[in-house]
Amino acid sequence: MSKTTDAVEILNSLISNDAEMQQMVFEASLNAEVGQLVFETRHQAGLTQEQLAGLARVEVSVIADIEEADYEGNALLVLHKVATALNQKVKFDLIPMKI
């Protein structure tokens, strides 16, 4: 078996038999995607975290935590509030998984 330096392959091999760890990695990945989306959208709008929080009617700490993928609440609800505050909407798609 050849060695790899691909971090994703290494991580996958370490957690392949651990369903709980796989779920934790999935949730962390999802939170990171939501955080990146909020961060990029806020920057495109030229807003500070404080300004976006005011528009979305959430605490500044919520925006900061979402952007850092460290929010313990319903990130999708906050994403909806952010989108609404910026006159946008959230769109979901289901796409085939890579095999």
Image (spheres, grey):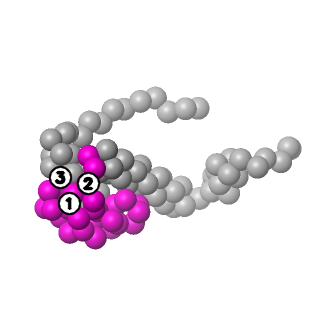
Residue at image coords 64%, 48%: 8
Separation of marks 3 and 2 at Cα, in angstroms = 15 Å
Q: Which residues are magenta?
A: 45-73
**55 or 84, which is in the foreground?**
55
Q: Mark 3 and 2 residues: CB-CB less than 8 Å, in contact?
A: no
Residue at image coords 65%, 54%: 11
Amino acid marked by disc 2: Leu
Residue at image coords 50%, 33%: 97
Secondary structure of residue under mark 2: loop
- Residue at label 1? 51
Q: Is residue 47 magenta?
A: yes
Residue projecting furthest to the front: 46
- Residue at label 3? 81
Secondary structure of residue under mark 3: helix
Residue projecting furthest to the right: 1
User: Is 52 on the left or on the right of 41, as rendered?
Assistant: left
